Amino acid sequence: MKKKFLNLGKQPIANSFLSSKSKKILSKEFFYNLSVSFNTKNFLVSITNPVDPKIQYTDKYAHRASESYTMRKAFKNIAYKIKKRFNPKIVMEIGSNDGVFIKNFPKKNIIAVEPCKNLAKITKKKFKTYPNFWNKKLANKIFKISKKADIIFSANTISHIPNLKESFDAINFSLSKNGVLIIDDPSLCSVIQNNSYDQFYDEHVYVFSALAISNIVKESSLMLFDVEKMTTHGGSLRYFICKKDSKYKKSKKLLRILNEEKKVGLNKFSTFVKFSKRITKSKKDLVILLKKLKKKNKKIISYGATYKSTTVFNYCKINNRYLDYVTDTTLNKQGKFTPGQHLPIVTPEKGMNKSVDYAFLGAWNFKKEILNKEKDFIKRGGKFITHVPFIKILTK
Ligand code: DWN
């Protein structure tokens, strides 16, 4: 049974950066109600009413996975580990984005699946790329006659697919006998502990826990046999999944993490009700802080036009009364306006100038990388604001 615990209000599509603030463009902006539910039977946390993927994953998709040094390094690292541990002949990636993971493999080993046509175009130049949504039809097209995949890798994508049952059935069909599915996704445990409610936006239909994944994959005759904790995206889990009759056995680490999740209460509705109360406080505290700083005539901007900050800005109604603009390194976000609250997006070179007093960390998951990059800003007295795990001004 699905029980609602969090209401983040009217939200736009997190990826819908606007090219202008003309009346025509604003009148077409799409909004939906973002609420989050807990399934008391399988412990899955999901958006109550997901948005149609066809309006999310278009040929204008903005996010480039290779934009940060942290992620380039993380994907290089997992590619190396996969080669070492599994020595796969055929590797398929679901949601290959701009190729940041697959570029670490020889061309002959790779099959890429990417429904956003602008991204598929990038990887198509070198790798066999299917510009389609992952489903049974596509699995059949790729694997009906050709050899099955030894590794299916998917980072920050499986959680974006509303029909999980079809997705995992198609994965089971596509894996070789001892093939392994590896999924990276933000962990529910980190979201609860960090109060990072901004991990909920239209694309994150699910925020997974090991408890939920182990229940769900069983329905597609698959088995979760290992799991790893990661620091990426503010705390993620890497799940290792095989066919239920393959050679792998459940690891001790998996059993330990399942127990840790039970201790945190990820199997209890009451945990999420408490989380929801903390989020209401987070919103109140952020608005109080911004109002206080504006009264003192401070200039505040936001750093990183993340999809996550779409949730924060629209939930807390943070517009140009508080923030002058948002900086971002991604070329195709610059010159545009943020979804819903319509803040202009500029380059960091232009935006991080001497007039800025405070920068809200929209890309808080890259705090270390950003603080390292922005030493001059900090040196001259500039300060970062974060909402993770609670509202505070960073002192270092
Ligand atoms: O799952 C998803 C995650 C992995 O990526 C997607 N559905 C969409 C996207 O979400 P996000 O926008 O919240 O992700 P990031 O990776 O936190 O975005 C960081 C943004 O900040 C990028 O637009 C790049 C920018 N950035 C910057 O301007 N300066 C990043 C760094 C590190 C910087 O120094």
Image: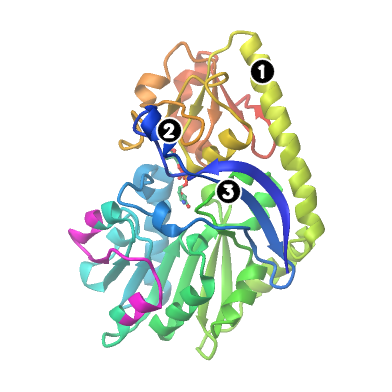
Q: Does the magenta segment cover residue 131?
A: yes
Q: Marks 3 and 2: which is nearer the front?
A: 2
Q: CA distance from mark 2 to mark 1?
A: 27 Å
- Residue furthest bottom as drawn: 245
Give the position of the C terminus as an image quadrant: top right
The amino acid sitting under disc 1 is Lys
Q: Earlier in the sequence, mark 3 or mark 1?
A: 3
Left or right side of 303 for 267: right
Q: Residues within 10 Å of mark 3 (few under 14, many from 20)?
A: many
Disc 2, SS:
helix
- Write the start and end of the magenta stretch as one range: 121-140
Mark 3 touches mark 1? (CB < 8 Å): no
Mark 2 touches mark 1? (CB < 8 Å): no
Q: CA distance from mark 3 to mark 2?
A: 25 Å
Left or right side of 68 for 219: right
Q: Residues within 10 Å of mark 1 (few under 14, many from 20)?
A: some
Say the numbered circle drawn on residue 26.
2
Per the image, the residue denoted by label 1 is 291
Per the image, the residue denoted by label 3 is 199
Q: Earlier in the sequence, mark 3 or mark 2?
A: 2
The amino acid sitting under disc 2 is Leu
Residue at 62% in and 13% down: 294
Residue at 43% in and 33% down: 26
Q: Earlier in the sequence, mark 2 or mark 1?
A: 2
Q: Is residue 274 visible?
A: yes
Q: Position of residue 111 (x, y in %)?
A: 29, 70
Q: CA distance from mark 3 to mark 1?
A: 25 Å
The amino acid sitting under disc 3 is Gln
Q: In this rendered view, identify the residue nearer to me: 322 or 156.
A: 322
